[in-house]
C-alpha cells in the first residue's frame, strides 16, 4: 500500500472508532497523519504516551504564580 492509501484507511478506521476522549490522543492522531514514519525520532511514541498519561492522572493542574522577588521587596518596604 502506498502512503495515500494508508492515510485513507487510517481515516476510515478512526471514523468508525469515534472521537477519543483524550485531547492529546486526538492531537497525536492528527500529527501522525502529517509526519511520515521516517521523520519520527526514537522517542516519538514515548513522548506521546507520557503526555497522554499526564492528562489522565487525577488531580488539579492549576499553577499558582509565585510573586517576583522584586515585588516582594517593594511590598515589604511599603508595609514598614
Image (cartoon, rainbow, N blue to C red):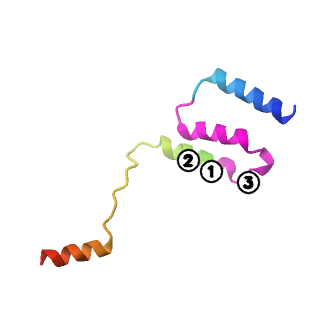
Residue underneath mark 2: 51
Q: Callout 1 environment at 10 Å: few (<14), some (14 to 19), or many (20+)?
A: few
Which secondary structure, mark 2? Answer: helix
Q: Secondary structure at mark 1?
A: helix
- Is the residue marked by circle 2 packed among few (<14), some (14-19), or many (20+) residues within 10 Å? few
Q: Which mark is residue 47?
A: 1
* Magenta part, dominant SS: helix
Whole-Å distance between the Cαs marked 1 and 2? 6 Å
Question: Which image quarter holds the C terminus?
Answer: bottom left
* Side (left or right) of 48 relative to 8: left
Contact between marks 3 and 2 (CB within 8 A): the answer is no
> Which residue occupies 28% across, 72% down?
71
> Which segment is the magenta one?
20-47
**Marks 2 and 1: in contact by CB < 8 Å?**
yes
Query: In the rendered structure, does residue 61 fall within the stretch colored magenta?
Result: no
**Residue in the picture at 71% in, 24% down:** 12
Amino acid at each position: 500500500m502506498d502512503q495515500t492509501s494508508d492515510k485513507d484507511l487510517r481515516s476510515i478506521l478512526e471514523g468508525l472508532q469515534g472521537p477519543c476522549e483524550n485531547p492529546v490522543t486526538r492531537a497525536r492522531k492528527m500529527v501522525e497523519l502529517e509526519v511520515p514514519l521516517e521523520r519520527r525520532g526514537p522517542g516519538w511514541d514515548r513522548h506521546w504516551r507520557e503526555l497522554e498519561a499526564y492528562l489522565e492522572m487525577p488531580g488539579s493542574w492549576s499553577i499558582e504564580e509565585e510573586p517576583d522577588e522584586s515585588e516582594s521587596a517593594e511590598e515589604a518596604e511599603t508595609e514598614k
